[in-house]
Image (tube, rainbow, N blue to C red):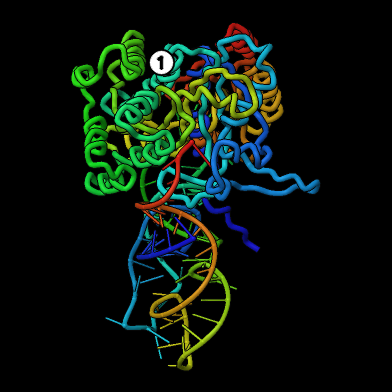
RNA sequence: GUGAAAGUAGCUCAGCUGGUCAGAGCACCGGAUUGUGGAUCCGGGGGUCGCGGGUUCAAAUCCCGUCUUUCACCCCA
C-alpha cells in the first residue's frame, strides 16, 4: 500500500533540507547578534490557549485532538500564546528586557496555496517589558538585518510601518464608536489587496456616514510624512501616536536601514490584539503575500492571565521567503548537502587497510572523510565517487606509500597534487590544515 | 469551507479526435577506463499512465467519483 504525504506538508530531501537549514541558520545567527535568546515550547498546547485571543473560526483552522484523559489539545498554529504563557510563569524572575526568539514548526489546517502550507517554520522575535518604541525599532531592525544578510535590498523589499494606536485615535476622533473598530480594522487591512472601488464599498458597509468614510480614505491615502504632519494637531493624542511612528523611523534611519522603511497607513494587520506600532514587509513588486508582519501587543500577557507588561514582536514564515529568494536567485542550487574534506582512495586494493585506518584518523581529528565501499574499484572510479561526494581533497595511497611511507594529496578543485610523508600529513592536520 | 485547472518513469514532459501508446531528455546504475574525477560514447534498471468505477470488442486517451497538486476566494495568528 502506497501512502502519500499529507496535504500541505513537505518532504525535505537533502537539497531541500539544505535550503531549510540555510534559512533557519540565518534566522538564528541574526537573532543572536541582535541580542535575542532562543526558547521553544511544546508543539501542542491546550486548545483553550488558542481560543483566548480569537473566535471559533480560528479553531476550525487548528489541528486539534483529544487525549485519552479527555483533554482538548491543539497543535500550535503560532507560538506567541506559548511565549506569553512561558513568560507569565516566570515574569518575576526574568531580567528585562526579555528578548527572545524561536523558530517553531507550526501547523494550520488551511487550504494550501502559494506561500501558504499546512506545516511551516516561522521565525519569531519578541521584546517584552519595554514601553519605548526603541523596542519596536529593534524588532524591525533585526528583521531587516536578516533580509539584508540574505541579499534582499531596498529595491527588493519594503518595510511598511504604521500604527494601530494612531489609526485608533484618528477613528475615535471622527466619531467612530469603540465597538466598531475591529470591524473597520478588518476592512482597512484589505486596502492594498482589493481594487479601489471594491474596497470603498466594503468601507461604506462599515462606515455609512459619507463624510467619515471620506476622512478615513484620506487618512489611508496620505503616506508622505510632511503631509501627515500638516493634518495632525499639536498636543493631541494623534500627535503622540504619530510621534511614535516618526521616532521608529528615525531610529531605523540611525541604525542604517532607513532606506528599507516607509510609513504606510494602509498597514493595519488583521488581528485585534495590536496596540501600537504595526508593520509588514512586502516584496516591492507586491505579487506575494506579506513576507512577515508584527507589531506591539501590550495587552497580550495580561490576556493570558499575567500582569500588564508591554510587548512587541515579529513573525516570518519560511514559505513566502523561500519563494522570494528563489525569484531573486538568492538561493542558488549550490547549497551543499554534504561537506567532505578528504576522500581517501587507494591505487591498489592491497592498500585498503591503510585507507580505513587513515579515514579513521582523519575523523578522530574532526575532519570529514570518506572512502569507497567497493574494494574492486579502480582509482578512476574512486575519484569519480570523490567528485560525486563533493570532496575537497583526495588522499591517494599507492606505490609511494610502499616506497617511502608517502601520500598523494590531490586538490579536487585545482587538480594539483603533492606528495607528502604520512606523518607530516598527520602533523599538518594538527596545525589545522 | 467555495470555485477553476492539472495528475504518464525520481524530475521535466511527449503521446491524448479511443486500436504497436507505454516514449524522450535529464537523473540513477554499469561499461569503455587495472595510478587520476567533472566531459564523451555505449548499455541497463525503473511506470498496472494518481486511485476507484463506468462506457466500449478495445481506455493513458471518453464519462463519473475520489485523492493530491497548483491558482484564486474565505481567512490570515
Other-residue count near label 1 (Cα within 10 Å), few / some / many at <14 / 14–19 / ≥20:
many
Q: Quadrant of residue A385?
A: top right
Q: Residue at x 49, y 31 (%)?
A: A273
Judge from the rendering whether residue A403 lies leftward or rightward of residue B13; answer left or right: right
Q: Which residue is denoted by mark 1 in the rendering?
A: A137
Q: Position of residue B42 (x, y in %)?
A: 42, 57
Please state the total of marks drawn on the protein image: 1
Q: Quadrant of the N terminus of chain A?
A: bottom right
At mark 1, the secondary structure is helix
Which chain contains the residue that carries disc 1? A
Q: Quadrant of the C terminus of chain A?
A: top right
User: In terms of depth relative to the viewer, which is nearer, A181 or A417?
Assistant: A181
Q: Position of residue A165 (x, y in %)?
A: 39, 24
Q: Residue at x 35, y 10 (%)?
A: A251
Q: Position of residue A158 (x, y in %)?
A: 31, 27
Q: From what the image shows, is residue A145 above or below residue A424? A: below
Q: Residue at x 41, y 20 (%)?
A: A140
Q: From what the image shows, is residue A107 above or below residue B25? A: above
Q: Looking at the image, can residue A332 be seen? A: no
Q: Looking at the image, can residue A82 be seen? A: yes
Q: From what the image shows, is residue A159 above or below residue A185? A: above
User: In terms of depth relative to the viewer, which is nearer, A132 or A403?
Assistant: A132
Q: Position of residue A155 (x, y in %)?
A: 26, 26
Q: From what the image shows, is residue A184 above or below residue A90? A: below
User: In terms of depth relative to the viewer, which is nearer, A141 or A396?
Assistant: A141
Q: Quadrant of residue A99?
A: top right
Amino acid at each position: 500500500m502506497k501512502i502519500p504525504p499529507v496535504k500541505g506538508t513537505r518532504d525535505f530531501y537533502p537539497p531541500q533540507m539544505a535550503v531549510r537549514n540555510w534559512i533557519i541558520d540565518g534566522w538564528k545567527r541574526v537573532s543572536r547578534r541582535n541580542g535575542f535568546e532562543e526558547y521553544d515550547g511544546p508543539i501542542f498546547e491546550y486548545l483553550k490557549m488558542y481560543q483566548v485571543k480569537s473566535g471559533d473560526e480560528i479553531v476550525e483552522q487548528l489541528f486539534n485532538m483529544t487525549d485519552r484523559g479527555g483533554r482538548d489539545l491543539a497543535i500550535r498554529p503560532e507560538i506567541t500564546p506559548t511565549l506569553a504563557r512561558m513568560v507569565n510563569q516566570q515574569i518575576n524572575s526574568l531580567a528585562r528586557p526579555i528578548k527572545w526568539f524561536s523558530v517553531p514548526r507550526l501547523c494550520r489546517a488551511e487550504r494550501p496555496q502559494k506561500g501558504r502550507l499546512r506545516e511551516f517554520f516561522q521565525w519569531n522575535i519578541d521584546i517584552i517589558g519595554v514601553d519605548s518604541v526603541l523596542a519596536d525599532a529593534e524588532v524591525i531592525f533585526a528583521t531587516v538585518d536578516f533580509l539584508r544578510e540574505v541579499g534582499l535590498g531596498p529595491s527588493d523589499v519594503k518595510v511598511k510601518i504604521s500604527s494601530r494606536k494612531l489609526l485608533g485615535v484618528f477613528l475615535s476622533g471622527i466619531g467612530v464608536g469603540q465597538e466598531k473598530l475591529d470591524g473597520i480594522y478588518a476592512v482597512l487591512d484589505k486596502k492594498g489587496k482589493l481594487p479601489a472601488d471594491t474596497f470603498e464599498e466594503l468601507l461604506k458597509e462599515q462606515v455609512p456616514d459619507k463624510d467619515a468614510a471620506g476622512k478615513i480614505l484620506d487618512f489611508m491615502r496620505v503616506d508622505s510624512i510632511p503631509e501627515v504632519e500638516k493634518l495632525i494637531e499639536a498636543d493631541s493624542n494623534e500627535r503622540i501616536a504619530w510621534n511614535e511612528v516618526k521616532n521608529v523611523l528615525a531610529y531605523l534611519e540611525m541604525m542604517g536601514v532607513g532606506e528599507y522603511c516607509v510609513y504606510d497607513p494602509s498597514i493595519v494587520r488583521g488581528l485585534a490584539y495590536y496596540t501600537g506600532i504595526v508593520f509588514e514587509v512586502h516584496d516591492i513588486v507586491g505579487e506575494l503575500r506579506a513576507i512577515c508582519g508584527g507589531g506591539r501587543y501590550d495587552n497580550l500577557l495580561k490576556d493570558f492571565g499575567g500582569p500588564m507588561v508591554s510587548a512587541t514582536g515579529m513573525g516570518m514564515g519560511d514559505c513566502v521567503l523561500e519563494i522570494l529568494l528563489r525569484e531573486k536567485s538568492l538561493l542558488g542550487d549550490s547549497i551543499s548537502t554534504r561537506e567532505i574534506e578528504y576522500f581517501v582512495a587507494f591505487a591498489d586494493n592491497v592498500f585498503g587497510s591503510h585507507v580505513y585506518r587513515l579515514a579513521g584518523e582523519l575523523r578522530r581529528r574532526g575532519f570529514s572523510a570518506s572512502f569507497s565501499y567497493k574494494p574492486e574499484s579502480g582509482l578512476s572510479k574512486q575519484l569519480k565517487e570523490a567528485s560525486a561526494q563533493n570532496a575537497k581533497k583526495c588522499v591517494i595511497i599507492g606505490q609511494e606509500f610502499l616506497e617511502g611511507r608517502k601520500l598523494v594529496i590531490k586538490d579536487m578543485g585545482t587538480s594539483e597534487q603533492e606528495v607528502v610523508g604520512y606523518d607530516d600529513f598527520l602533523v599538518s592536520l594538527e596545525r589545522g590544515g
